Image (tube, helix red, strand yellow):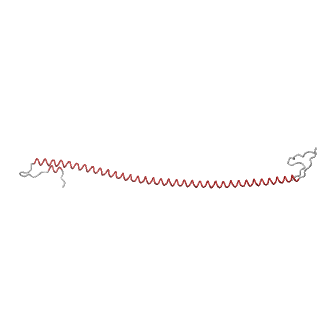
Amino acid sequence: MEISPLEITQREFARKFRGLDPEEVQTFLEQIAEEMTRLVQETTEQAAQIQRLEAQVRVNQEREESLRNTLVTAQKITEDMKANAKREADLIVKEGELNAERLLEQAHRKLAQVQAEVAELIRQRDLFAAKLRAILKTHLELLEAQPARPVTPGAPTPQPRPGGGTPGAPTG
């Protein structure tokens, strides 16, 4: 049963012979009413404060949940970025290795080509030297095969011809 402070102050009691002192009862009821008013007001203030605190707790819980979600998302993004960076780095390294292998293969091919060209030039040089030796040998043999002519004093010395060779020498 709820009793308000107003009901306490307006309550009237039946009087009986040799009953209670009405002023004392009234004073006591007024004191009770004042105390009850104070308690009701205090209870109301506390209830309002509880509601404010509960609202603040809910807001803080929502913030905490939001922060937790943000942190989880940030961690996931960070992990994804790390994974992507690693994949990209691996890809760059692999590309670099493939390029290096390709360049090395090209260098080997070029080396083989240059070595083949050098070998061909050496072969051509050796062939040219052999042919030149053969020509020189043939000419030497021809020169040695010719009889020696005595030099006659006062005889004109043969002069070289404009096309090469000497006059009177057999043409070959």
Residue 171 placement, left or right of 62: right
Q: Nearer the viewer, residue 128 or 145?
A: 145
Tally of numbered discs? 0
Q: Is residue 162 above or below residue 87?
A: above
Can you give x and y, in whole percent of width and height, for residue 78 in the image? Answer: 45, 52
Residue 15 placement, left or right of 160: left
Q: Nearer the viewer, residue 102 or 152?
A: 152
Can you give x and y, in whole percent of width and height, for residue 160 in the image? Answer: 87, 46
Residue at the left extreme, as displayed:
17
Residue 55 placement, left or right of 106: left
Can you give x and y, in whole percent of width and height, for residue 88 in the image? Answer: 52, 54
Q: Nearer the viewer, residue 69 or 30?
A: 69
Q: Quadrant of the N terminus?
A: bottom left
Residue 160 placement, left or right of 93: right
Q: Nearer the viewer, residue 80 or 26?
A: 80
Can you give x and y, in whole percent of width and height, for residue 119 in the image? Answer: 71, 55
Residue at the top extreme, as displayed:
154
